[in-house]
Image (cartoon, rainbow, N blue to C red):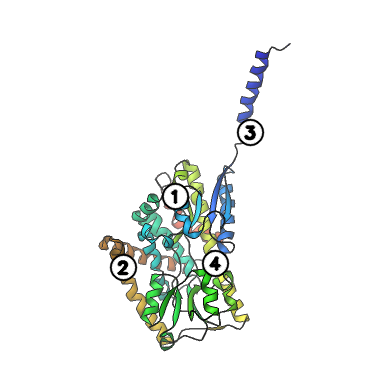
């Protein structure tokens, strides 16, 4: 007959043995994405699979589409740990990320390079990754100050001109009301006598359909993302140029990051490279598909008048030199350091335009390998984010 003491001892031993054989419960990371659908959500799903794979099921990801944090709430939400990972748009918090946003604001430089038509976003993602992760300690400091760790970039295809009426000359732009997407595009509009109008992206459909604005600057993907294909009548494909790259597509809460060992950190950086490649590649693929849909719908697709294109390029060259001055004045920063960083960013845009021009990118996997080899693999995993 077993005594109670002996039975308790046996049960305790069995429980201890079981604790060594049962798999540990996976840690679930909450990923907030302020979009209901489209390339960001599709890329986030691939990110979730990558985290699961690279951590050998130790960590998993649950995606919250719109429901956890909006774009305007994302910065503070990641900071406070409401989300472990977030699709952060740093342009919503300009004073928190001036060094990072300056790199993004130089995106109109891609309009000056004709080596990579329809691949500008692929190159700019690479340039932004290398700028923030390897060349801009001030950028790293911005994320650290907000209790965040940057592991992936946000990058759209190039911005084009959507209009109600045909507008592709310098003269036709004068006096037009144009919904803009940021300061460089506002300056471009003013350069040609147009009036920049700041409107939330969700109001663009109504503004165009009711004639509140004459035109808007968007990437081609917004034709279907926001159903603008129903109201846009004319598209100019080669002005104003530039793209949106202000943000971190997989920005982690630093308090969470600090608890990860080196293997976990490397796995999450690999997943970040997947997120970056997927969102960049999917956006560009969708842009080409949406352009074809526009043509099939009978929307007038045209190019800028040569004089407008020439003067646009002249403005961009001038504005690229002005951007570091603007950031120095606006945020009371060291102008010499900003000039140094803007010079580095220009070098990186050229470098990555050459890399993409020489590479055969047929899939997001090809792009991910390129980003990993050229940038992520050079990060000091032990020190990164500390």
- On the image, which quarter does residue 8 sit in? top right
Q: Is residue 200 visible?
A: yes
Label 4, residues with CA under 10 Å away: few <14, some 14-19, many ≥20: many
Q: Is residue 366 visible?
A: no
Is 212 left or right of 144, judged from the image as shown? right
Is 11 left or right of 82, judged from the image as shown? right
- On the image, which quarter does residue 189 sit in? bottom left
Helix or strand or loop: what does disc 4 sit on? helix
Cα–Cα gap, marks 3 and 2: 58 Å
Badge 2 or badge 1: first in the primary sequence: 1
Q: Where does label 2 land, which residue?
A: 326
Give the number of the mark in front: 4 or 1: 1
Q: Where does label 1 land, which residue?
A: 79
Q: Is residue 113 above or below residue 68?
A: below
**Are circles 3 and 2 on residues that touch, CB within 8 Å?**
no
Cα–Cα gap, marks 1 and 3: 34 Å
Place of residue 56 in the rendered image (x, y in percent of width and height, measured from the top left): 58, 43
Q: Where does label 4 land, which residue?
A: 283
Place of residue 129 in the rendered image (x, y in percent of width and height, measured from the top left): 43, 59
Q: Residue at x 25, y 62 (%)?
A: 336
Q: Where does label 3 land, which residue?
A: 22
Label 3, residues with CA under 10 Å away: few <14, some 14-19, many ≥20: few
């Amino acid at each position: 007959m077993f005594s109670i003491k002996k039975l308790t001892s046996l049960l305790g031993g069995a429980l201890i043995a079981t604790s060594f054989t049962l798999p540990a419960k996976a840690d679930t990371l909450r990923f907030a994405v302020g979009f209901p659908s489209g390339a960001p959500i599709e890329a986030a799903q691939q990110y979730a699979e990558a985290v699961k794979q690279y951590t050998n099921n130790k960590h998993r990801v649950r995606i919250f589409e719109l429901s956890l944090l909006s774009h305007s709430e994302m910065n503070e939400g990641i900071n406070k740990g409401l989300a472990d990972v977030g699709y952060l748009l740093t342009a919503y918090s300009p004073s928190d990320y001036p060094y990072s946003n300056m790199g993004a604001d130089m995106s109109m430089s891609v309009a000056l390079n004709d080596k990579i038509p329809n691949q500008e976003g692929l190159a700019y993602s690479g340039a932004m990754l290398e700028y923030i992760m390897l060349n801009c300690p001030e950028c790293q400091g911005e994320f650290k100050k907000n209790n965040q760790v940057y592991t992936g970039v946000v990058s759209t295809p190039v911005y084009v001109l959507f209009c109600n009426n045909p507008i592709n000359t310098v003269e036709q732009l004068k006096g037009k009301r144009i919904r803009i997407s940021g300061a460089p595009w506002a300056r471009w509009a003013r350069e040609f006598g147009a009036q920049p109008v700041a409107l939330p992206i969700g109001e663009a459909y109504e503004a165009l359909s009711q004639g509140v604005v004459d035109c808007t600057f968007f990437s081609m993907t917004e034709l279907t993302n926001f159903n603008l294909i129903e109201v846009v009548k004319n598209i100019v494909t080669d002005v104003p140029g530039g793209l949106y790259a202000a943000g971190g597509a997989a920005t982690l809460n630093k308090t969470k990051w600090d608890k990860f060992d080196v293997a976990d950190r490397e796995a999450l950086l690999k997943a970040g490279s997947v997120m970056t490649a997927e969102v960049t590649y999917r956006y560009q693929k969708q842009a080409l598909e949406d352009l074809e849909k526009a043509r099939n719908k009978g929307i007038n697709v045209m190019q800028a008048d040569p004089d407008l294109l020439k003067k646009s390029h002249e403005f961009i060259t001038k504005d690229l030199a002005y951007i570091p001055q603007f950031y120095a004045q606006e945020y009371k920063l060291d102008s010499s350091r900003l000039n140094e960083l803007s010079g580095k960013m220009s070098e990186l845009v050229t470098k990555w335009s050459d890399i993409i021009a020489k590479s055969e990118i047929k899939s997001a996997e090809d792009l991910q390998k390129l980003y990993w080899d050229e940038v992520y693999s050079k990060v000091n995993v032990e020190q990164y984010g500390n």
